[in-house]
Amino acid sequence: MDLTRGKRQLDFSYKEFIQGLQSMGFGPTKAHCVQSSLKSGQQLVRGTKDDWKNHIRDVRCYIADRDAQMVINKLSNSSLHFKNNFFKYLADAGELRNMFWANDIFKSNYKLFGDVLAFDATYHTNRYSMIFVPFMGVDCHKKCVMFGAWLIYNETIDSYKRLLKVFIKAHGKQPQLVLTDQDPATKQAVSAVLTNSHHRLCMWHVTDKIPVKLKGEMERNNEIKSRVHKLVWNVFIKLETFEHRWHEMINDYDLSGNKWLTDMYAICQQRVPAYFRELPMCCLMKTTSRCESSNSQFKYDTTTTSPPMLTQLPFELHALQVYIETIFKDVQEKIYKGLYRCSCERVEYVYETKIHFVKHTNKDKRLVGEFKVTNNTEENSFKCSCMLFTRISYLCKHLFCVFKANLIEKIPDRYIHTRWKNDVLSSYLFNIEYRYDVHLDEKSKLRHEFLNLTNLCADRARGDIGVLQDMVSQMTKLKDKIWQGIPNEPSCNKSTIIQDLL
């Protein structure tokens, strides 16, 4: 009987199930197997595997060349429900050319974490060869976070200028630092539009080309590569030290005639951390790899767990209270090293300023260096020569060493950056409505609420056959009443059903 024509007809719930699993990467065959397992038997499932495949075929045939319009409709409809969503597109002669969207979560992310922005084009992401450009940053967990996304038709200067103007219109402010690759169109567009931002080029695109651009023996090239890495990735190195060591390397290996290295040195001020020491958050991102391999799915248990204390210092407990867990672990490491690997050697006084000279050793007790921590007693301000707070906005081990020596029990408020605090994210951003693929119309909400209530009742009564029989009887009466009031399937048109599914 399960193979008769009537029993093989798929109702809306089955089609919704097929479509849901299809969107998660499960084809109709696997979806049929899943449903058979859930129903405890293939004979209890409507339709065969071929019927389920035919449904997916019908959906694809319906979409056909409507796909661009369907995306526009979906994003436009989302903007109706969430007034803070931003969506713009450009069509020419009926063809979609550019499209940008930033929902409420993206905009909230940018407001909190938009001081540093990275974007990079991803090629051939679809059959139309449109270019996908995600705008990425780093959130309070040091994870990838999106600020918006753009589909563009071509990579011209005008396209990127238009993109950046729309981005600024959506968010209302420019970032402090912009990180991109070395694409000429991108560079010109950034300098023309983001006039208040510092533009920095991706460091990886330089170091990755070293083996190709250098000729000679492998051992010699590996030595050069190692020295270049120590220079360009070093976040502590000062500008004059970098330039001295760079020229020293060029002379040691007789590389003055290497055009590529000469060109790279000419634009070092756009790449190397030494040139960005004074810029806040300059070391939050150094490459555009977050754009190329972004992942928006993260699980955090910061509200349910508490990491153990490593010291008995009062400002460690204070750090736990104010920082989100990911950042607390970094700060905790600085506190630990400030206690066991740093020591105040001497103190000098210059008017209202105390200058602490802090000796920093590694785990083998070898001297790493001596750093100056300046304390303006009148303003109660601190500054370390390593400039970690400027680069990443939490305190260094040398400052915590000075805190211990001066019996300071709490981290001053001015040194607790908002982006790293445990209450930085608004609670409304975690509401279910802000997740993708949530049906927002009232009919869909009520339908799913009824299905959930039915499942809850069936689960609660699963051990009482009398209650289950009563439920079946009541549902049969309700079904007969509904069939009497609505004698025909409301979506008798196949295309209408597919519209409801999509």
Image (tube, rainbow, N blue to C red):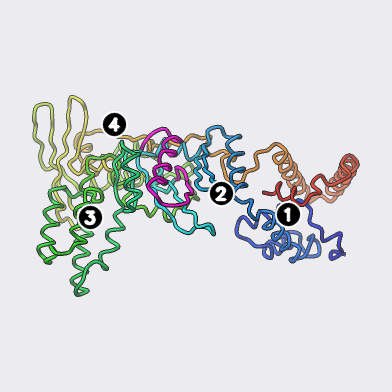
Q: Which residue is mark 3?
A: 232
User: Which residue appears farthest toward the front when viewing the image?
Assistant: 93
Q: Are marks 2 and 3 in contact (CB under 8 Å)?
A: no
Q: CA distance from mark 2 to mark 4?
A: 56 Å
Q: Tell me, yes or no, if residue 289 can be seen here.
A: yes
Q: Quadrant of the N terminus?
A: bottom right
Q: Which residue is mark 1?
A: 15
Q: Residues within 10 Å of mark 2 (few under 14, many from 20)?
A: few
- Give how far apart the Cα atoms at labels 4 and 3 are: 33 Å
Q: Give coordinates of residue 7: x percent, y percent.
A: 84, 60
Q: Is residue 137 visible?
A: no
**Of circles 1 and 2, which is in front?**
2
Q: Which residues are magenta?
A: 146-174
| Spatial separation of the CA atoms under disc 4 and disc 1 | 58 Å
Sequence order check, earlier mark of 1 and 2: 1
Q: The disc labelled 3 sits on which kind of residue?
A: Val
Q: Secondary structure at mark 4?
A: loop
Could you say which disc has been placed on residue 412 in the image? 4
**Residue underneath mark 2:** 95
Q: Residue at x 27, y 68 (%)?
A: 212
- Residue 141 is tagged as none
Regarding mark 3 in the picture, which secondary structure is present there?
A: helix
Rendered view: 4 above or below 81: below
Q: Between marks 1 and 2, how big is the CA–CA gap?
A: 30 Å
First-in-chain label (4 vs 3)? 3
Image check: 393 left or right of 464?
left
**Does label 2 or label 4 sit earlier along the sequence?**
2
Q: Name the kind of residue labelled 1 in the image.
A: Lys
Tell me if 412 is positioned left or right of 259 in this view.
right
**Label 2, label 3: how many angstroms apart (C-alpha)?**
44 Å
